[in-house]
Each structure stands twice: as structure tokens, then as C-alpha cells.
Amino acid sequence: METGCLVCAEDIHKSFNGVRALKGVSLFVPQGEYVAILGPNGAGKTTFVEIIEGIQTPDRGSIRIKGLSWKKNAHELHKIMGLSLQETKFFERITTLETLRLFASFFELGESRVQEIIEMVNLRDKVSARTVHLSGGQRQKLALGLAILNRPEVLILDEPTTGLDPSARREIWNILCDLKAKEKTSLILTTHYMEEANFLCDRIIMMDQGLIIKEGTPEQLLKESGKANLDELFIYLTGRGLSDETVSKAN
Ligand SMILES: Nc1ncnc2c1ncn2[C@@H]1O[C@H](COP(=O)(O)OP(=O)(O)OP(=O)(O)O)[C@@H](O)[C@H]1O
Ligand SMILES: [Mg+2]
């Protein structure tokens, strides 16, 4: 186990009816680091982050967050984690404001935090709208607002900007940048947008077929590969298949 890590995921394996979604994935995230997980559809990103979030249990491997485990310390972990899933479902018949107040009550947070979040995610003019009537971008902003409501030490966002227009995406980036400047939050984010990973994150993890195939800072990855940009690197890495070395590590 690495020292100084807030999130320590070690040698995580997971299969679904013979499909090996994760074949031994490890990730160590210190306090305050922003990490992006990239990879093609089906690479195992959601499975991996849902295991860190305690939503799924691994077949093998260990998860420790601040030294705590989901098995023994679920209550404590819920207090320090914030998350948004790849597809967020809200209670459709209640409003944005009621949704925020409901979640705030779970954490015993008062109205002032609810109002602060409404400002942060810029949903002032939608407070009275039922969640069923929110647009895709507004839903993503509400999901992010709920995820950061309890000032989490660890924030995990599964494709928070997929399907958003460029300005809505920028809005989410700005909220996350503000958070990085003001709090000591660690972020694990999955995305299909190289620009997003590059803009927001200190480190990029590339996954394919249930394995980490490359990781490093955006600068390191580009320098090492000689590619002009991260899109090219992604296509190069995932298009050529896995190296013999990576495959042998998985078996
Ligand atoms: N509950 C499940 N039952 C069966 N197979 C599953 C289940 N969850 C995931 N899988 C399989 O595990 C693999 C990894 O899926 P996962 O959702 O983790 O990928 P992903 O990298 O998040 O993909 P995407 O970019 O499309 O969101 C896929 O082959 C998927 O079909
Ligand atoms: Mg996914």
C-alpha cells in the first residue's frame, strides 16, 4: 500500500458471468489530486468507480479510503464522499429546490448551504422547476450540486459532462476548478473528452479491457508518446490493442 494516499484501490478484479470487467486495477489518489479515467466504451471505468464508491463489491482486491473500508465503515465513508453516477435519476415530481433540501437533510445541513449550492451550480432560475422538466445540462448541474453538498473529501463523477454543449461543459469545469482552489477535495472523474481531462486533471489514467494501459500527467503522456495531442494518443493506445506485457500482467 502506498503512503499518503486518500483513496487506495489495490488489485481490483471483477467479473460478470464470465465477462472480466476488471483484471487487476490499482489506483492511489492523494488528498487534493484530480484524476481522470479515460477509456473506450466497456473498458471498465464505471465498474471501477462504482467499486470505489461502495456500490459494487470487488471479487478480489482491496479498497481503503482514508484507511476505512466499505465493509466496516460505510457510515463514516458516506459522510466524506460525494458522487454522481453515469445516469442520474431524481425524484421527478419534486423541484430542484426540494431535491437539494431533501439531500441536505440527510447530512443535517441547513438552508444556507442549499442556497450556496444553488449559486455555485447556477440553477437560481430553475429552483421551482420539477426535476423531470430540467434539461440535460441542468440535470448534470443538479447532480454535481448534490455530489458536493456535504463538502466531500473525495468526489467521484462518472461522465459528468457527457452530452452537454460546450458552454454547459465549461460551467461544470469552472465549478470543479473553484472547488480545487477552495477545498482540499480529491476528484476521480471518468470522461470521454481528452480536453476535459487535460484541463481539469493532474493525472490521466487510460483504461482498456479491464486494465490500466497508461498513466501520467498530460505532459508526460504526450512527451513520452511523441503524439501531438491526447486524442491521437488515445486512438494509438486503444486502436493498436494491448501490448504483450500488459496482457501477461492480467493473466
Ligand atoms: N451488471 C453487469 N452485468 C453484466 N456485465 C456488466 C455489468 N456491468 C458491466 N458489465 C460489463 O463490464 C464491462 C465494463 O463495463 P463498464 O460499464 O464498467 O464500462 P465503461 O468503461 O464504464 O464503459 P462506458 O464508457 O460505455 O461507460 C462491459 O463489458 C460491460 O458489458
Ligand atoms: Mg461507464
Image (spheres, rainbow, N blue to C red):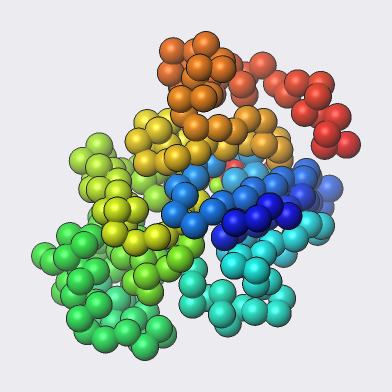
Indicate the position of residue 187 as horizontal and vertical percent values: 46, 53
User: Is 122 displayed left or right of 188 in the figure?
Assistant: left
Tell me which residue sits at (49%, 57%) in the image: 31
Q: Quadrant of residue 68?
A: bottom right
Tell me which residue sits at (50%, 32%) in the image: 217
Q: Can residue 16 be seen in the rendering of this structure?
A: no
Q: Quadrant of residue 57?
A: bottom right
- Between residue 119 and residue 192, name the one nearer to us: 119
Looking at the image, residue 171 lies above or below residue 120: above
User: Is 119 displayed left or right of 249 in the figure?
Assistant: left
User: Looking at the image, which residue sits at the far left?
Assistant: 125
- Give the position of the N terminus as an image quadrant: bottom right
User: Is 103 displayed left or right of 154 in the figure?
Assistant: left
Looking at the image, residue 117 lies above or below residue 224: below
Tell me which residue sits at (59%, 33%) in the image: 215
User: Is 31 displayed left or right of 128 in the figure?
Assistant: right
User: Looking at the image, which residue sits at the far front?
Assistant: 3
Q: Can residue 187 be seen in the rendering of this structure?
A: yes
Indicate the position of residue 113 as horizontal and vertical percent values: 25, 77
Tell me which residue sits at (34%, 61%) in the image: 183
Indicate the position of residue 121 as horizontal and vertical percent values: 23, 60
- Give the position of the C terminus as an image quadrant: top right
Numbered circles on residues, count: 0
- Between residue 193 and residue 17, name the one nearer to us: 193
Looking at the image, residue 143 lies above or below residue 250: below
Indicate the position of residue 80 as horizontal and vertical percent values: 49, 72
